[in-house]
Image (cartoon, grey):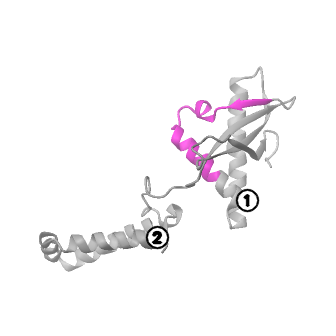
Amino acid sequence: MTLRLVEASCYGALLVGLWMVRPIRAYVRAIPRPHRKILAGLFLLLLVGQMVNRPRLTFPFTSWAMYGRPEHPDTLVFYRYEGLDEAQQVIPLNPFRLLAPISRAEVASKFKDLASAALSHPDEGRRAASQRRLSALLAAVGRIHNTRHPDRPIRAVMLVRCTLDLRDGGRSDIQRQRVWRADLTEGGT
């Protein structure tokens, strides 16, 4: 049985349980029929948004899966950012500090979403658009770094995917893979 079927069954059992409560049933029956249809429609949209779990497709009826759906149950995936100077020396970048007025969670989420779409979106057109946006965002981080650190400018920004295997309790090393490069003078690759 799939996890979504289990989740849907839980929602169904919850609804049946609520319907079995006499005051709730009486309250719903007392609501005028057009209002009941509107409420049922809104509830159905919320349920579909929760089950589909594709926020861009079902907005504003998106899933709320803060604790319900692990993204990578066996691995932790996060990103690091590196600048490359003229001599190809690596300079660690902290976009959270460079983009300080913006929420750290927003920055991390934007990079993660763009990286995911740029590297593996099934629609080639959307993948290409995400690649352009990712390159532009990384280049912006690089330009901000260069403005704040004119003594050590960088020529490119690398996006590094870091993965940590959690099956061994986090005892293994973090695996690092450079997955994207954005040149400050060009579009990025």
Q: Which mark is residue 59?
A: none
Work out whether residue 148 or residue 21 is closer to the camera in this orientation and state it.
21
Instruction: Return the x and y of residue 156 as percentages of the image width and height.
Output: 79, 37
The reply to whether residue 157 is in sight is: yes
Q: Mark 1: which amino acid?
A: Ala
Residue that badge 2 annotates: 4
Q: Is residue 37 left or right of residue 151?
A: left
Work out whether residue 35 or residue 112 is closer to the camera in this orientation and state it.
112
Q: Give SS at disc 2.
A: helix
Instruction: Return the x and y of residue 106 as percentages of the image width and height.
Output: 53, 43
Q: Residue at x 79, y 47 (%)?
A: 187
Work out whether residue 73 or residue 133 is closer to the camera in this orientation and state it.
73
In the rendered image, which quarter is residue 123 located in?
A: bottom right
Q: Residue at x 14, y 71 (%)?
A: 27
Per the model, the C-alpha gap separating discs 2 and 1 is 31 Å
Q: Residue at x 69, y 38 (%)?
A: 81
In the rendered image, which quarter is residue 36 located in?
A: bottom left
Residue that badge 1 annotates: 128
Q: Residue at x 21, y 74 (%)?
A: 19
